[in-house]
Amino acid sequence: MTPIRSCVGCGERAAQATLLRVVWREGQLAADPGRRAGGRGAWLHERSACLDAFVARRGPVRSLRAAVPRAAREQLVRALRAGARGGEE
């Protein structure tokens, strides 16, 4: 059975394998392409519309149990669009 997760951008439920895991730790939002980083994670499609919706959202990200600042979301999206998925351990 394939694990199903919800995208924090669009809210659509999708197979975990089709989503990118992101984590909030030590005051930074980081991509977790290996899905091994400790801590709370959220799932995100890498589609442009989902990335834009994630940046525009207000309030806390429930799956991360944190109020992630807009600047941190913008920084992550810029890095993803530039192709910098790896390197965050």
Image (cartoon, rainbow, N blue to C red):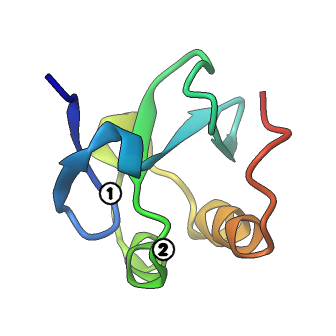
Residue placed most toward the observer, 47 or 42: 47
Residue 33 % position (x, y): 62, 39
* Distance between mark 1 and mark 2 Cα atoms: 9 Å
Residue placed most toward the observer, 33 or 27: 33
Task: Say if 39 sits above or below 71 in the image.
Answer: above
Residue at 32 percent of width and 39 percent of height: 16
Task: Say if 88 sits above or below 36 in the image.
Answer: below
Q: Quadrant of residue 2?
A: top left
Can you say which quadrant of the picture contains the C terminus?
top right
* Residue neighbourhood size for the residue with mark 2, other residues' Cα within 10 Å, grouped as few (<14), some (14–19), many (≥20): many
The three-letter code of the residue at mark 2 reads: Leu
Can you say which quadrant of the picture contains the N terminus?
top left
Residue at 69 percent of width and 65 percent of height: 80
Per the image, label 2 sits on a secondary structure element best described as: helix
In-image side of 22 versus 56 (left or right) = right
> Residue under circle 1?
8
In-image side of 6 versus 80 (left or right) = left
Per the image, label 1 sits on a secondary structure element best described as: loop
Say whether disc 1 or disc 2 marks the residue closer to the N-terminus.
1
Residue at 39 percent of width and 40 percent of height: 17
In-image side of 45 versus 1 (left or right) = right
* Residue neighbourhood size for the residue with mark 1, other residues' Cα within 10 Å, grouped as few (<14), some (14–19), many (≥20): many
> Residue under circle 2?
51
Residue 29 % position (x, y): 64, 46
Residue 78 % position (x, y): 73, 74
Q: Residue most toward the front?
A: 1
